[in-house]
Image (tube, helix red, strand yellow):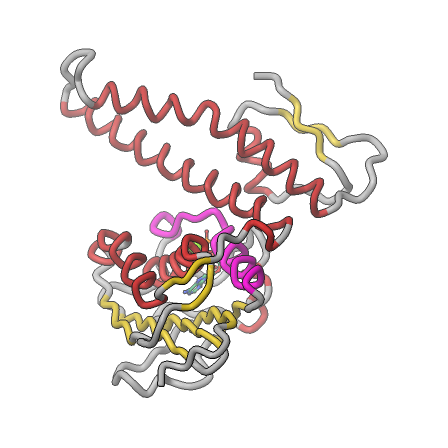
Amino acid sequence: MGRVIRILGAEPLPADLRRLIEEAGLSIEAAPGAPEASASARATFVRDLVHELSTPVTPLAGYLRILQSEKLGPLSAQQKKVLESMVGSVQRLSRIIENLSDFANLQTSAATLRLEPVDPDAIVEEVLGDMRRAIRDGQVHVTVTKAGGGALVADGKKLKQAIGNIVGNAVKFSPHGGEILVDVVREPDVLRIAVYDQGPGVVPGEQDGIFEPFHHAATRGGDDARLPGSGLGLPVARRIAEAHGGRAWVESPPRAQPGTVSHLFSGAKFVIEIPAPGGSAA
Ligand SMILES: Nc1ncnc2c1ncn2[C@@H]1O[C@H](COP(=O)(O)OP(=O)(O)O)[C@@H](O)[C@H]1O
Ligand SMILES: [Mg+2]
């Protein structure tokens, strides 16, 4: 403990980040007379922070698993319950750290992309597979319309992450029994993935802000406890789209309803578009 993180620049630190730093037992000190932090200085800072946060979290997760295995002695039902919620909290912390890490890495340049031929329909399937549990628990129903056609050149892992962040939000903000549509469309020069939901939507005044780090819109459906998040999902998704030369945005309510399904999508429509030259599905 007692490690000091120096903050470059005069910008106030986002509240969530400040809390993370303090929870990690680090203290914050503004560098006197520091110049405006450049993007790369900020990225370096976040990378250091990610390292500092991961170092204690990794053994913590390991020790909790050992306790859970009862190799060190039997546990009462109550102790098991306590351990389970500790494991849940550590997993949540790990996810925050992962998003922070991606956020830092994506801030610098597009040079980090690993381009390869990928099948967008398969990526969407993988995302939904990983989210099976949340989808089931939220009692939401997901429809996918596939693009078909061949592979396109992209960073498959990053694209999966971007789509995952957006679909994860749709699941998280959907009412029980809500419908979600993941519409994958291949046009002559772009791949477009649009995710429609029936949640509370995003008011016009918040539609830019939610793509900024650590921003949560004021209007949120359901109770907050059901909606944990780091506030980095959308900024990371947008950066991934932009690193591919594409973009990401929200329309809420959707400007037009999809023609493929009969439900009315009254909530948000999030779109990721990346260039896919010469690859029409036709
Ligand atoms: N599908 C959605 N419906 C309504 N609001 C959304 C949706 N997706 C994102 N938002 C708003 O955007 C904010 C930022 O989203 P995100 O960057 O993924 O962070 P997080 O999910 O951690 O809150 C959310 O807190 C929420 O206010
Ligand atoms: Mg999110």
Q: Which quadrant of the picture is home to ligand 2?
A: bottom left
Q: Would residue 225 be counted in the magenta stretch? A: yes
Q: Which percent across, then down, holds residue 126?
A: 29, 57
Q: Observer-nearest residue: 280 or 55?
A: 280
Q: Where does the magenta region start and end?
A: 224-244
Count of residue discs? 0
Which image quarter: residue 152?
bottom left
In x, y percent, where is residue 239?
Answer: 56, 58
Is 185 left or right of 143, judged from the image as shown?
right
Say which quadrant the C terminus sits in: bottom left
Residue 50 coordinates in the image, percent (x, y): 54, 34
Quadrant housing residue 174: bottom left
Q: What residue is at 51 percent from the left and 46 percent from the top?
A: 102
Q: Is residue 41 magenta?
A: no
- Looking at the image, which residue is at 25% across and 85% down? 262
The quarter of the image holding the N terminus is top right
The dominant secondary structure in magenta is: helix
Q: Residue at x 38, y 57 (%)?
A: 164
Above or below: residue 256 compared with residue 45: below
Q: On the rendered structure, is 37 left or right of 67?
A: right
Measured as percent of width and height from the top left, residue 251 is found at 49, 75
Front residue of 244 and 92: 244
| Relative side of 139 to 257, left or right | left
185 vs 160: above or below: below
